[in-house]
Image (spheres, grey):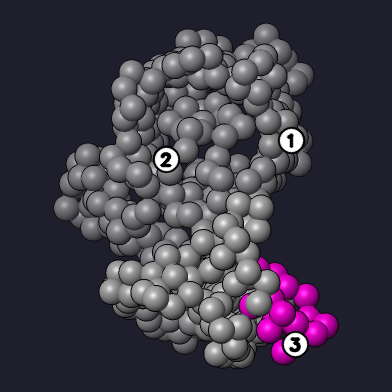
């Protein structure tokens, strides 16, 4: 598996290298342009504003009328997108923009009514269009999405290869769990970029997610039960397409140490889902936010190694959330189908509440569990206490610790601890 991950990592790197180079170079140029543009604006000390004849005095109304007459003479049939007034020293200019790819901008000396420039105009920098891929039209947008996914694949496969290598080194050197967790989180901290309230660090999910762009959440968890211990490192990737719809992919590496048996490590099962928030919360009334998040679990964990059972699973949960002052309450319920007779379908459920103690610190509790559909009396329940701390505008540290409240077979997590770093990248 490690060899395959290395091969995927290598080929992904070769495939997207040129695109990532273009993105990096255009991004640097955009930052330079922004710095130069900001300095130029400060030196020019010009003032731009929208012109409204209903509020302008007679002099400005007359200049606007002369300028528009000159524009109509130069472009009699062109629609107008915007009109700007620029004051720079003793000169007053009217800038009229027209639509198109590229558009057209006519600049008029407002005092004399003479056209001083008539040129093609792009609202966005050409380097911005290169950076986003829009310069190639719709195919460019698709290519831009692909090179973004390429970067995600490189990050994910790189972490997985590292975890595989580290697990083997640790088995030889006998290093403790705490160093593995800290090492994983330190490697993940290369990511940086509005904190979002969401289900993490709890098992129960809620309707919330970032309004746009990427949400990247590296995480580590530890379970201790009567059968042994389980350590899991995961990378949770979320991308908000529109403010009410996001995609999610969770890749994980797992290590088990059964009582009286040999330890095993490798891939855990992989989860893919999308979440749609179909009802928005009414902050001044009683209407809660609601979402639905269909989920598919791919059996990527090794069955022979005891890391998984090789069963495909399909889950359809519904989330509900409501804010009451400093308190936020949310719940989740749904049904999970197992595509095999060796596993049973499950009812899933959870209820949680959080309270903001400070603008940076939030604490909460939850009850979360599941029950086999053919034997509801064998339900399980876990109680968790969690906290979230805002490090800066784009980074949060989250963690939770809990214990089994009820588990008839005592195979669930007697003790469960989780820690997350959450990074948000606006698009």
Spatial CA distance of label 2 from label 1 is 22 Å
Q: Which residue is mark 1?
A: 278
Q: Secondary structure at mark 1?
A: strand
| Mark 3 or 1: the one toward you | 3
Q: Residue 140, percent across and down? A: 64, 79
Local SS, label 3: helix
Residue that label 3 marks: 73
Which one is in front, 284 or 387?
284
Report crowding for label 2: few under 14, some 14 to 19, many 20 or more residues within 10 A (C-alpha): many
Up-down: is 333 above or below 426?
Answer: above
Tell me where residue 373 appears, x and y as whole percent. Answer: 75, 21
For image coordinates 55% across by 19% down, the residue present is: 323
Q: Earlier in the sequence, mark 2 or mark 3?
A: 3
Q: Which residue is situated farthest in the front direction here?
A: 58
Q: Which residue is mark 2?
A: 195
User: Which mark sits nearer the N-terminus, 2 or 1?
Assistant: 2
25 and 163: which is toward the camera: 25
Please, what secondary structure does the residue beneath circle 2 have? loop
Residue 359 shown in magenta:
no
Numbered range of the magenta stretch? 67-83
Report the side of 348 relative to 236 (left or right): right
Q: Is residue 301 above or below residue 61?
A: above
Residue 2 falls in image quadrant: bottom left
């Amino acid at each position: 598996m490690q060899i395959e991950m290395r091969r995927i990592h290598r080929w992904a790197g070769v495939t997207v290298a040129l695109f990532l180079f273009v993105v990096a170079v255009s991004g640097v140029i955009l930052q330079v342009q922004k710095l130069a543009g900001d300095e130029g604006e400060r030196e020019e000390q010009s003032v731009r504003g929208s012109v409204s004849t209903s509020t302008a005095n007679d002099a400005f109304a007359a200049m606007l009328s002369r300028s528009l007459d000159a524009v109509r003479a130069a472009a009699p049939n062109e629609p107008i997108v915007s009109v700007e007034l620029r004051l720079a020293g003793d000169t007053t200019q009217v800038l009229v923009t027209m639509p198109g790819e590229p558009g057209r901008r006519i600049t008029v000396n407002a005092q004399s009514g003479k056209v001083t420039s008539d040129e093609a105009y792009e609202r966005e920098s050409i380097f911005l269009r290169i950076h986003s891929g829009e310069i190639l039209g719709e195919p460019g947008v698709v290519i831009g999405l692909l090179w973004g996914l390429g970067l995600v694949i490189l990050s994910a496969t790189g972490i997985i290869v590292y975890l595989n290598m580290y697990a083997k080194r640790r088995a030889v050197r006998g290093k403790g769990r705490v160093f593995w967790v800290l090492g994983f989180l330190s490697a993940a901290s290369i990511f940086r970029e509005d904190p979002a309230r969401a289900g993490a660090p709890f098992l129960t999910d809620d309707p919330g997610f970032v309004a746009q762009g990427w949400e990247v959440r590296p995480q580590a968890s530890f379970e201790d039960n009567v059968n042994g211990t389980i350590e899991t490192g995961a990378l949770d990737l979320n991308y908000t397409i529109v403010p009410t719809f996001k995609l999610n992919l969770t890749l994980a590496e797992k290590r088990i140490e059964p009582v009286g048996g040999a330890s095993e490590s490798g891939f855990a099962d992989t989860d893919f889902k999308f979440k749609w928030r179909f009802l928005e919360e009414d902050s001044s009334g009683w209407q809660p936010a609601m979402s639905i998040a269909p989920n598919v679990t791919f059996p990527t964990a090794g069955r022979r190694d005891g890391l998984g059972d090789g069963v495909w699973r399909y889950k359809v949960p519904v989330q509900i959330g409501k804010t009451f002052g400093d308190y936020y309450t949310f719940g989740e319920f749904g049904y999970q189908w197992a595509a095999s007779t060796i596993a049973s379908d499950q009812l899933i459920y959870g209820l949680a509440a959080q309270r903001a103690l400070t603008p940076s610190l939030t604490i909460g509790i939850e009850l979360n569990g599941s029950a086999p559909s053919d034997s509801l009396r064998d339900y399980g329940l876990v109680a968790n206490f969690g906290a979230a701390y805002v490090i800066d505008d784009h980074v949060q540290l989250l963690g939770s610790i809990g214990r089994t409240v009820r588990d008839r077979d005592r195979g669930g997590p007697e003790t469960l601890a989780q820690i997350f770093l959450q990074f948000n990248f606006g698009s």
